[in-house]
Image (cartoon, helix red, strand yellow):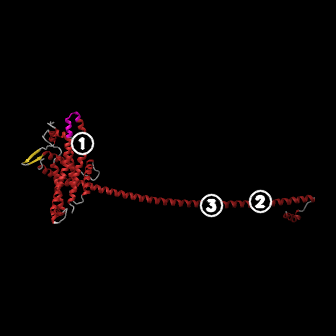
Amino acid sequence: MDIGGTLVVQAIGFAIFIWFTWKFVWPPINEAIETRRTKIAEGLAEAEKGKAALAEGEKQKAVMLKEARDQAGEFKTLNEKQALALIEEAKAQAKAEADRIIAAAYAQIEQEKQKAKDQLREQVASLAVVGAEKILQREVNAQAHAEMLSQLKGQL
Amino acid sequence: MASYNSPTDYISHHLTNLKVTVASGWTINLDTVVNSFVLGAVTFGILFMVARSMTAGVPGRLQAAIELLIEFVNSQVKEVYHGKSTLVTPIAITVFLWVLVMNSVKLIPIDWLAWVTHLFAPYWRPVPTTDLNTTLALSLSVILLVIVFSVRAKGVGGYIHELFCTPFGSNPLLWPFNFAFQLIELVSKPLSLALRLYGNMFAGEVIFLLIGLLGAVGVGGVIVGGFLQAGWAIFHILVVALQAFIFMMLTVVYLSMAEEHH
């Protein structure tokens, strides 16, 4: 084993390689790695922010949806109430109209009845006069007995 | 293809460095130096290319792979080292990757490499980390850095004070013991670092060579040796990566300890 010259040469080579690595190899590689590391960290932070924003949006969406639903529900009940009221009103109107028509019909019927009664009375009176004429076998002076006849008519 | 006279010849041949004398008394293991430098240049060249075209956006496949590796080292460093120096991670990256690629040469069947290298050299030891020179160069450099980090964190006075007053206390009677203790630490740290890596790699290489010897026995030996080679190589993927990782972790630990005040 011959220790000496080779050792010195190898040591010089080692020194050169260390210097070379320190000067030309390590700095750019380290820089690139560090730059990428910060980039990745930033990206992750951004993603985290995005996630938070999304969650916030989701929450807002839920709130808005609930509001809209509540409002729709309110509108619906209001509409239903209004519709019911309208129906009630229409019913009441219809009932009033029907009552009126029925009352009018009753009145007319009453009138017709009265008229028929009057006519009947008239005919009965004249029939009675004719009957009396026949019984008496003589002409009755209608003018002389008009008063008596109208009295009779009133009693019928 | 070279032929070998005996099993011993085969093994020692593969474990002999190609020596070149550059000056009187200075020989250099050319195979170790060339292999490690070429591997380092390719590795850090690829890293440089990736670093130059780095994008913070969606990374390409190569960039993603390199980032994974660098991030792995960096996270280990961050866990252990809490100081301010920006040099620790580059040191850790260099140690880990360089040792890893040097160790990984072992996973290429050794005789395939020998086949190629015999075309131009009588000896060519392929794995630089099986040469104690390489591992010692790394560990001694690390210890030098540890001392530099210590002095930078505590000042020259502070470091000398630590050499003489820890771990037993600042009583002048204890100074020699403290200093001896610190010296042992300063020697044992690089030795253990270097020998651990060297020992693992060297022993693994010897096992590969012993398995390779089975090929000389005949067809049966080739078949059995093939399976053993595959098994040992698969196991060695773990050892290769683990030893690189251990070397890197200990380097980072030593550097972070250097900045601690006692």
Chain name for mark 1: B
Rounded to the nearest whole Å, what is the CA distance between mark 2 and mark 1? 136 Å
Q: Amino acid at mark 2?
A: Glu
Q: Is B219 part of what is drawn in magenta?
A: yes
- Say which element carries label 2: helix
- Residue at 56% over, 60% down: A77
Quick check: marks 1 and 3 in contact, CB under 8 Å?
A: no
Work out whether residue B65 can be spotted: yes
Q: Amino acid at mark 1?
A: Trp
Q: Are marks 2 and 3 on the same chain?
A: yes
Boundaries of the magenta span: B210-221
Name the quadrant containing residue B206. top left
- Say which element carries label 3: helix
Q: Main SS of the magenta segment?
A: helix
Mark 2 neighbour density, 10 Å: few (under 14) some (14–19) many (20 or more): few
Numbered badge on residue A118: none
Chain name for mark 3: A
Q: Is residue B174 left or right of residue B75?
A: left
Is B194 rendered above or below residue A152? Answer: above
Q: Nearer the viewer, residue B9 or B145?
A: B9
Instruction: Please name the residue that numbered disc 3 is placed on.
Output: A88
Instruction: Please name the residue that numbered disc 1 is placed on.
Output: B232
Q: Is residue B87 left or right of residue A130?
A: left
Instruction: Please name the residue that numbered disc 2 is placed on.
Output: A112
Q: Amino acid at mark 3?
A: Glu
